[in-house]
Image: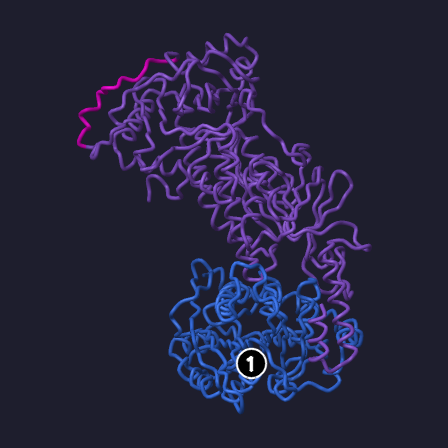
Chain colours: A purple, B blue
């Protein structure tokens, strides 16, 4: 400050002016350090992340990892009590039923922000093979990571592991952050106006009055102010609602049951079988455990949730084996199409395999309805939506959270650009860069997943044959297969039209 | 594009294909002229500051404003700074200019480009600051910024807006000219004059003033519009005559400088041009990009030679 003062003394002609500007600078600096002064009714942050789930914390961790954004002052608003403490996951416990299949693109993002090393210390399961088949017995396809010249197709990680690993990154970083254990009640922002108030040092309230800050009222009665509010609060986003952003979408008349099961052997393959009422997926989660995501109509789902454990295990084994229809034959009747196959990769010769048997249910069965929802806008002034608050997808290929991580990555990149260029980080033009990057990618993935869901929602002879043909096509035409793997792995281009 | 034209004609905007920066002063005037009843500050464009304005500090000048005048300033400031408003093309171009400035100045002063405030400790002057669209980001990048403009109204607007954020409230705005600051003997680490030189009567003298404001081994940055057929077509024929976004005669094509001429007059003023880049508008993405094409809009970065003495 002495330096500034000295320079001001040198450069200013008018004595009164020196005094005024210097004083204001001093007070301003104090205010920006403390982020609070007596006339304000709430602390001031650069960014308020509403929702401290995987995607919200991913944004915080991503900001913390970038030199341009690590100085930012971040508020995390979430009433999850786990956020404040460091939650160590005991190794002895069976895995949680809530898991995510993270793609290689997400893995590299998690490596960039420094979270992957924590995940590797905990339970996780890479898989390099995937088998998809359907109940008609007409087709199957096996994907192998080698086909796309990758080491792995993905990794299954418990959500709480993803969450706590990223939280560790945030906690060990220099990022200034405060967790507010509360829910968001209301959000206010005024149009930009330089008219209101002309105090020498604008208070938080004054900045709010001039449209420079958004005001958040929390359920515990506190007010928080921020330049940018990020809605990472899930498919029923309160931020989205308060920002008046509309959504389009529909509910599938389907529910999913998820649970953890145990085998007698270890599982290294991701399995998915399309049944008449929806797909059942068996994902490796480490040790001898697997995770089940079974989609079916709501009536069937509540029956299966309530049935005895033994009956449920029997139903699962049935669904993954001979139930609803026979195994597909390895040597198919599609040899006539060999001219279509082109370069045949090794895995096309791989035989159909039966998934390992389930012997024990290791968690409760959880049920949730499926829907597709997409926000018309991802951003408005001082608001950005990421993850499920912007888009809820069919959990078919486990893509939901990957899209969310990609959102967090893109938004933190846009914020870093804004900081680099000295922009107000709540500026709509800046946030639109994030939207422009993510919206087309998310819509494309949603359309693909919705299309697959629709294709399987109908049990109709010719369509079944068509599906089988599609399987065969995908199984044998290796460039296409490679594309499908790359796309499912988080690459941006569409599998068919690029 | 149709939509853009509709908006443009409705709001009498400047068109993004031509540099919108140059229209700032006029645009501002057309706004205030539209409401002439309260245009108590419809000063002439090149109004010379009065001693009173110069001596006044901010609180005095604001308190001396009448209520409706204050409201007027504020409305214009908000229009100017509204990113979706009439100055939208300018807001879109600003990041591109700033990217060039950031990278060249970081290199010039050996500052860490990955720092959030790389210009910490640097004294910059924004000559022809207008509403402060350039000064504010530079202040957020850590610079100690002085903004000057010959138009008193612009300075008031810039002041009002900068005070909305504690980080930018440290900017000093003065209604003065580069020449006057030279007379006062002021110098700065870097001098920026974007979209100004095409409006001055004597570019060579102006460049000498900019050079005199730059410390030896400091940096000088200028941007302007080229005297090319493409610039003529877009800035004058299209904007002034066909689309009538601008009053006829806004630009005098013959007074534009080519990159070679600018380099030469800067050279004579002891500034060696080190780098030049063009701004190109992509109407599909609505973004401006830096490019090698300097045929319409261009920006030049030069360094002040260390030959002490006369300019």
Most common SS among magenta residues: loop
Q: Secondary structure at mark 1?
A: strand
User: Where, quadrant-wise, is the N terminus of chain A in this rendering?
Assistant: bottom right
| Left or right placement of residue B216 versus residue B38 in this view | left
Q: Is residue A432 magenta?
A: no
x%, y% of residue B104?
48, 69
Frontmost residue, B149 versus B74: B149
Q: Residue at x 58, y 69 (%)?
A: B134
Start-end of magenta stretch:
A324-339
Frontmost residue, A271 versus A239: A271
Chain label for disc 1: B
User: Where, quadrant-wise, is the C terminus of chain A in this rendering?
Assistant: top left
Question: Dividing the picture into quarters, in which one does residue A52 lie?
Answer: top right
Q: Is residue A329 magenta?
A: yes
| Left or right placement of residue A340 versus residue A274 in this view | left
Determine the residue located farthest toward the bottom in the rendered image: B310
x%, y% of residue B297?
44, 73
Q: Is residue A377 visible?
A: no
Disc 1 target residue: B214
| Left or right placement of residue B202 versus residue A38 in this view | left
Q: Residue at x 69, y 71 (%)?
A: A3
Q: Is residue B206 visible?
A: yes
x%, y% of residue A432?
53, 53
Q: Residues within 10 Å of mark 1 (few under 14, many from 20)?
A: many
Residue A374 sits above or below residue B285 on the image: above
Q: How many numbered marks have been drawn onto this rendered protein structure?
A: 1
| Left or right placement of residue A2 versus residue A105 in this view | right
Q: Residue at x 53, y 75 (%)?
A: B194
x%, y% of residue B101?
51, 69
């Amino acid at each position: 400050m002495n330096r500034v003062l000295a320079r001001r003394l040198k450069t200013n002609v008018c004595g009164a002016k020196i005094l005024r500007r210097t004083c204001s600078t001093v007070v301003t600096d104090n205010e920006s350090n403390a982020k609070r002064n007596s006339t304000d009714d709430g602390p001031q942050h650069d960014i308020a992340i509403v929702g401290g789930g995987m995607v919200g914390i991913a944004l915080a961790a991503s900001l913390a990892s970038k030199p341009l954004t690590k100085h930012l002052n971040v508020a995390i608003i979430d009433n999850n009590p786990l956020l404040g403490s460091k939650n160590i996951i005991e190794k002895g416990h069976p895995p949680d039923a809530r898991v995510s299949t993270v793609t290689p693109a997400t893995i590299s993002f998690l490596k960039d922000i420094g979270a992957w090393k924590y995940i590797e210390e905990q339970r996780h399961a890479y898989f390099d093979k995937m088998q998809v088949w359907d109940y008609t017995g007409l087709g199957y396809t096996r994907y192998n990571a080698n086909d796309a010249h990758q080491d792995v197709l993905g990794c299954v990680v418990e959500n709480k592991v993803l969450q706590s690993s990223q939280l560790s990154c945030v906690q060990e970083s220099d990022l200034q952050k405060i967790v507010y254990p509360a829910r968001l009640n209301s959000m206010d922002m005024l149009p930009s106006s330089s008219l209101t108030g002309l105090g020498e040092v604008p208070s938080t309230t004054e900045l709010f009055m001039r449209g420079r800050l958004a005001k958040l009222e929390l359920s515990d009665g506190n007010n928080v102010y921020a330049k940018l509010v990020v809605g990472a609060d899930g498919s029923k986003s309160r931020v989205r609602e308060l920002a008046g952003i509309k959504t389009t979408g529909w509910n599938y008349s389907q529910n999913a049951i998820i649970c953890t099961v145990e085998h007698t052997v270890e599982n290294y393959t991701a399995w998915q079988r399309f049944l008449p009422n929806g797909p059942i997926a068996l994902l490796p989660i480490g040790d001898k455990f697997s995770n089940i995501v079974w989609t079916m109509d709501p009536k069937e789902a509540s029956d299966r949730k309530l049935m005895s454990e033994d009956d449920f295990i029997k139903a699962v084994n049935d669904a993954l084996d001979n139930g609803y229809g026979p195994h597909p034959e390895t040597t198919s009747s599609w040899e006539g199409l060999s001219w279509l196959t082109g370069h045949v990769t090794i895995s096309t010769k791989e035989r159909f395999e039966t998934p390992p048997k389930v012997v024990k249910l290791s968690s409760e069965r959880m049920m949730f309805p499926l829907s597709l929802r997409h926000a018309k806008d991802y951003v408005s002034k001082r608001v950005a939506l990421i993850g499920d608050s912007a888009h809820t997808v069919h959990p078919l290929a486990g893509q939901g959270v990957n899209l969310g991580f990609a959102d967090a990555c893109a938004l933190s990149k846009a914020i870093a650009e804004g900081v680099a260029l000295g922009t107000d980080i709540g500026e709509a033009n800046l946030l639109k860069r994030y939207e422009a990057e993510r919206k087309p990618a998310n819509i494309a993935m949603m359309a693909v997943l919705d299309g697959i869901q629709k294709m399987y929602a109908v049990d109709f002879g010719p369509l079944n044959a068509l599906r089988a043909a599609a399987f065969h096509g995908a199984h044998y035409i290796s460039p296409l297969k490679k594309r499908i793997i790359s796309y499912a792995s988080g690459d941006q281009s569409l599998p068919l039209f690029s | 594009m149709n939509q853009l034209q509709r908006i443009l004609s409705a709001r009498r905007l400047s068109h993004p294909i031509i540099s919108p920066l140059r229209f700032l002063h006029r645009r501002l005037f057309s706004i205030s002229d539209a409401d002439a009843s309260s245009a108590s500050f419809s000063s002439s464009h090149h109004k010379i500051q009065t001693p009173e304005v110069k001596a006044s500090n901010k609180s005095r000048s604001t308190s001396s404003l009448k209520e409706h005048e204050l409201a007027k300033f504020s409305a214009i400031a908000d229009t100017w700074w509204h990113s979706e408003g009439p100055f939208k093309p300018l807001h879109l171009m600003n990041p591109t200019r700033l990217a060039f400035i950031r990278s060249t100045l970081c290199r010039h002063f050996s500052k860490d480009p990955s720092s959030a405030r790389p210009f910490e400790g640097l004294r910059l002057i924004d000559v022809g600051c207008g509403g402060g669209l350039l000064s504010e980001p530079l202040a957020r990048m850590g610079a100690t910024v002085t903004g000057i403009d010959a138009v008193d109204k612009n300075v008031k607007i810039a002041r009002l807006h900068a005070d909305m954020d504690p980080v930018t409230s440290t900017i000093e705005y003065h209604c003065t000219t580069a020449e006057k600051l030279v007379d006062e003997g002021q110098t700065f680490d870097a001098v920026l004059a974007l979209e100004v030189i095409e409006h001055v009567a004597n570019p060579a003298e102006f460049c000498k003033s900019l050079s005199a404001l730059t410390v030896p081994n400091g940096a000088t940055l200028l941007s302007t519009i080229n005297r090319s057929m493409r610039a003529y077509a877009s800035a004058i024929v299209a904007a002034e005559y066909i689309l009538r976004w601008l009053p006829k005669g806004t630009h005098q094509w013959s007074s534009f400088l080519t990159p070679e001429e600018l380099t030469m007059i800067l050279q004579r003023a002891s500034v060696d041009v080190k780098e030049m880049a063009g701004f190109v508008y992509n109407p599909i993405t609505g973004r401006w990009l830096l490019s090698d094409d300097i045929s319409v809009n261009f920006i030049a970065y030069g360094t002040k030679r260390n030959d002490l003495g006369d300019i």
